[in-house]
Image (cartoon, rainbow, N blue to C red):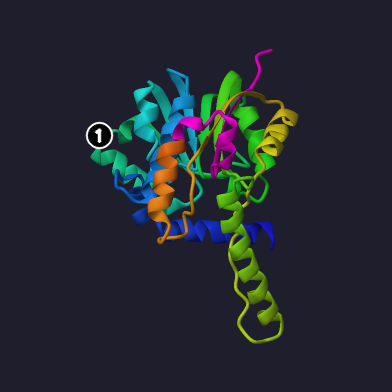
Amino acid sequence: MELLEQEQLVKSHYNKISNQWGDLYKDEVTFANYNFIVRKRHVMGLFDKTGGRFLDAGCGTGDFIPDLIARNGQVTALDFAGDMIEQSRSRMAKKGLDTRVDFAIGDVTNLDFDDNFFDAIIGVGLIEYLSDYREAFREFHRVLKPGGIVIVTVPSIVSPFMAYETFVPKCKGLVKQMLAAAGLREPERAYFQRHFVPWTLDRDLRRLGFLKKDFSFCTYGFSASKRLESLSLGLTRRLDGFGHSPLGMLATNYIVKAEKPRA
C-alpha cells in the first residue's frame, strides 16, 4: 500500500467517525469506553509537566485538552482530520476553553513549528496509524525543548489478547485477498494498524535520541468481542494496578514516556 493511500484511508475513517469519537470517553460501563478512560488515566499519570507549551498530537475530539489546560499548559491541538478538529473546537467552546487552545490541521511527520518549541507532547492512539512513525518521532525530538517529554500509546502485540485479535482479522484479510485475486470478489482497500513489541519501540526512541523515563501497561481483554465484554472489564479492573510489573505485559496497551535529554 502506498504511503499516501494509507494516510487518505485513515483520514477518511476518522472524519467519518468524528461525531461519535468523543463518546468513547464517556464514563459508561462498556469495555470500549473503559479502555479509553483507563488509558487516559495512565497517560495523565505519567504526565509530570506543569506550565509551558503542550502539543496534543492527533488530538481527535479534544478529550485530553481540559487535562492539559489544568496543568497550566498553552495547548496546541493538532490533527490531520479536519472534522476531528472542528469537533474538538466545538466541544471546547461548550466548556469555555476554546480561546485557550490553538487548533491546527497538520501532519505529525512534518510539523510546522520551530525547533525546541514544546515542553511536552502526547500522542494517544496515533503512532500505530502512521506510515512512517519514526519520522514522527524525529519531528517530536526536533520541536521539543531539551528536558521536554513525549508520551505515546501503542497497541502491544506481546499481549495474548491483542495477538489473538490481530491474528483472526489477518487470516480473514488473506482469504479476501485470495478471493479477489481469483476474481471472486472486489478488492478491498483498508488502512493498516501497526502493533508494537514494547522493547522494540523503546529501542527506536533511544536510537532517535530520546531517554526513556517511565512506562505503563493497561487494559486487558478482547475489545472486539461483545460476548466477552464482562470478562474483559473484570480483568482490566483487577489487573490495572500491575502496569509496572511483569504481569502488565498481558495488557493490550503500552504507554511510554521519553525525554529529550538536556545538553
Q: Quick check: 134 left or right of 54?
A: right
- Residue at horizontal 42%, vertical 38%? 238
- Magenta stretch: includes residue 155: no
Mark 1 nearby-residue class (10 Å; few <14, some 14–19, many ≥20): few
- Magenta stretch: includes residue 241: yes
Residue 136 location, quadrant: top right
Q: What's drawn in magenta, residue-wise? A: 240-263
**Residue 32 visible:** no
Instruction: Tell me the kind of residue under disc 1.
Output: Gly
Q: Quick check: 242 left or right of 100?
A: right
Residue 87 x/y as whole percent = 35, 49
Q: Quick check: 4 left or right of 97?
A: right
In this view, the residue in front, 30 or 74, is: 30
The quarter in which the N terminus is drawn is bottom right
Q: Give the labeled residue for mark 1.
A: 96
**Residue 245 visible:** yes
Residue 2 x/y as whole percent = 69, 61
Q: Is residue 174 above or below residue 243?
A: below
Residue 26 location, quadrant: top left
In this view, the residue in front, 203 or 218, is: 218
